[in-house]
Image (cartoon, rainbow, N blue to C red):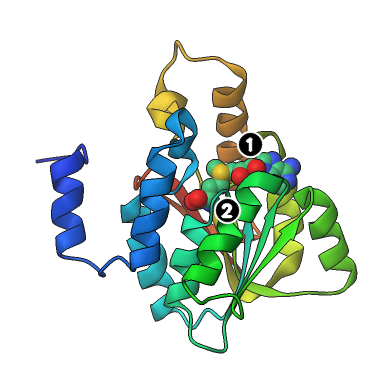
């Protein structure tokens, strides 16, 4: 029995050929990010993007909050899957990448659907709680040190039956390696066991991209 597949370039291309067509602006962002060197890996994988689009299209999700926008690939991918009445609010503290994301959002003509907020995410989330804002889906993909804080604040911002999706929960596979005990691997391990024991949500870890956890508020 094959337990899992390594998704190499040609398999990813095969998946792409048989999935949603990439929008020209998604292709542009991939090209742009390729030129950024090491940090290009910040972007969600193309396969994760297909998953997000399927998930959004089939679950009646309308209001999305994204924590960690980078150059806009995940926000535009989600925005494209939303109905016209939907919206994505994106939080990031990096001026340069937020400016790039805005350029791509305009290029995709999604400026009415996607709203960027340039500020440290914790401050914005606390403000949103005060204003009683609610979301159907919250995507956590920013600084790992704050994952637990983002998760706790996100629970308060979720509509009944809303979802939280968290990226990088398998941390290049390092979470399962005994000899890996660096700061970030341990942060992710602690976060994963915290979510496992959290009775406020049902959850599943899926090994797509760098690993995502999907949580549903119960
Ligand atoms: C992994 S990238 C997000 C990738 C994006 N979701 C995509 O698929 O292209 C993480 C982002 O989180 C942002 N970030 C890190 N710490 C933050 C903080 N405290 N507040 C807001 N944004 C933060 C970084 O500037 C970076 O753009």
Mark sitting on residue 100: 2
Query: In the rendered view, would you say 189 is above or below 93?
Result: above
Badge 1 local density, few (<14 within 10 Å), some, or many (20+)? some
Q: CA distance from mark 1 to mark 2?
A: 23 Å
* Place of residue 67 in the rendered image (x, y in percent of width and height, measured from the top left): 65, 54
Q: Nearer the viewer, mark 1 or mark 2?
A: 2
**Closer to the camera, 176 or 23?**
23
Is 158 placed left or right of 10 in the picture? right
* Image quadrant containing the N terminus: top left
Residue drawn at x 30%, y 65% is 22
Quarter of the image where ligand 1 sits: top right
- Can the viewer see residue 4? no
| Nearer-the-camera pick, 147 or 10 | 10
Q: Is residue 196 above or below residue 99?
A: above
**Would you place residue 109 above or below residue 192 in this image?**
below
- Counting from the top left corner in percent of width and height, residue 113 is at 59, 78
Residue at 33% over, 63% down: 50
The C terminus lies in quadrant = bottom right
Residue under the point 61% across and 38% down: 191
Asked if residue 87 is positioned above or below residue 124 in the image, the reply reads below
Q: Position of residue 28 (x, y in %)?
A: 38, 56
Sequence order check: which comes first, mark 1 or mark 2?
2
**SS under mark 2:** helix
**Residue 188 visible in the picture:** yes
Q: Position of residue 166 (x, y in %)?
A: 54, 50
Kindly state the secondary structure of the residue where label 1 is placed.
helix
Residue farthest to the left?
1
Q: Is mark 2 within 8 Å of ligand 1?
A: no
Residue at 57 percent of width and 33 percent of height: 188
Furthest residue toward right: 130
* Residue assigned mark 1: 144
């Amino acid at each position: 029995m094959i337990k899992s597949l390594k998704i190499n370039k040609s398999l990813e291309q095969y998946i792409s050929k048989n999935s949603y067509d990439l929008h020209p602006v998604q292709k542009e962002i991939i090209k742009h990010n390729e030129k950024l060197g090491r940090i290009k890996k910040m972007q969600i994988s193309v396969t994760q993007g297909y998953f997000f689009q399927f998930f959004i299209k089939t679950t009646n999700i309308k209001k999305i909050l994204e924590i960690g926008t980078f150059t806009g690939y995940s926000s535009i991918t989600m925005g494209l899957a939303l109905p016209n009445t939907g919206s994505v609010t994106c939080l990031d503290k990096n001026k340069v990448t937020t400016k790039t994301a805005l350029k791509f959002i305009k290029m995709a003509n999604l400026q009415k659907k996607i709203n960027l907020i340039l500020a440290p995410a914790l401050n914005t989330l606390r403000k949103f709680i005060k204003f009683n804002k609610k979301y159907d889906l919250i995507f956590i993909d920013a600084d790992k040190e704050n994952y637990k804080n983002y998760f706790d604040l996100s629970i308060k911002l979720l509509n009944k039956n809303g979802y939280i999706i968290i990226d990088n929960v398998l941390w290049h596979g390092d979470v399962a390696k005994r000899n890996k005990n660096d700061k970030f691997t341990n942060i992710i391990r602690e976060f994963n066991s915290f979510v496992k024991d959290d009775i406020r949500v049902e959850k599943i870890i899926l090994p797509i991209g760098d690993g995502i956890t999907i949580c549903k508020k119960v």
